[in-house]
Amino acid sequence: MSYQPPFTITSKMLTLVSEIVEIITDIKHIEVSLKTPKLRKKNRIKSITGTLQIEGNTFSEEKVTNVINGKTVLGTMREIAEVQGAIRAYEHFDTYTFKSEKDLLKSHKLMMEKLLSSAGSYRHTNVGVGDQNGVTHVAPPPSQVPELMGNLFEWLQNTKDHPLIVSCVFHYEFEFIHPFEDGNGRVGRLWQSVILNHYKKIFGFIPIESVVREHQKSYYKALEASGSAGESTPFIEFMLEIILKTLKNAVNENVPKNVPKNVPKNRLNEIVKLIEKNKEITSIQIAERLKISDKTIKRDMATLKEQGRLQRVGSLKSGHWEVIHDE
């Protein structure tokens, strides 16, 4: 491997990686809930809204939802095109191969094809990144972009570093190269999520981009700090903190209320299997089959409802339970 992005493994990084790995291990009790179509769509909308708002798009989650649902919305043609492009790019999220430079170019084309004539191709012009205080970063000349991106993907394909750190390094290096005429921030954030999704599927169900939006100023400061340091270390530490916050938010928002947090997963699965075999089965009959109290079964079924795995059809007296399968 010829190219090695410059960064230093710090004790802070190791601590954050350890905390993230621990929370991923403990998150199993809500993973089914996060994977339900309804919640996944909600979090995908958060991701799209967050990543676009970072770039100045004013659309709210409600307006993005309306675009997805084909409703008429008020906004500039550019803002609507940005939303439509982001929707298309994220629709292919599960099909991207994170090590594929071709897939990254595809994601840019989907994201920007209504905004740029050069969508899906590297830039042929010089670009600088800045704010109200002026230019903060001059990207490498366009003649170097193909080689730099080739080197970055070669490293991505061969590195033995932890995927959590790799995702952050790639994100920073991508923004440093700034390979496209426009859309670099959106694609960089998307591709970090793609890398993380390959590491653990749970990252396909949580809106990291939305949390970055909540800490937008710190996000840009971390990019600038890494640029000044000549290595991505400050940005890696920042993004690991963002990943941890996103996971903690997922836990806090999706733990069922008023039911135990440590319901045995096997017992929940057994309840689902019994209902699949006989939708007319009662909670008392399930309790008898599993040799636990009726009160416990009612709590377990409340958990399954919160997770989006069960729904009640009809009244409590004459209705029945139905299992909800992911689409």
Image (cartoon, grey):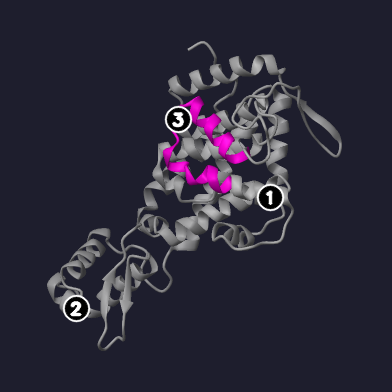
Dot placed on the residue nearer the N-terminal end, 3 or 2: 3
User: Residue at left 22%, top 78%?
Assistant: 283
Q: Give residue 242's quadrant in the image.
A: top right
Residue 99 magenta: yes
Mark 3 vs mark 2, foreground winner is 2
Local crowd size for mark 1, using a 10 Å CA cut-off: few (<14), some (14–19), many (≥20): some
Q: Give residue 176's quadrant in the image.
A: top right
Q: Amino acid at mark 3?
A: His
Q: Which residues are magenta?
A: 86-112
At which x and y percent is residue 192? 53, 36
User: Residue at left 17%, top 68%?
Assistant: 274
The residue carrying mark 3 is 162
Mark 2, secondary structure of its residue: loop
Mark 1, secondary structure of its residue: helix
The residue carrying mark 1 is 53
The residue carrying mark 2 is 280
Magenta part mainly helix, strand or loop?
helix
**Left or right: residue 117 compared with residue 38:** right
Q: Answer yes or no: is residue 210 visible.
A: no
Q: Is residue 260 above or below residue 158?
A: below
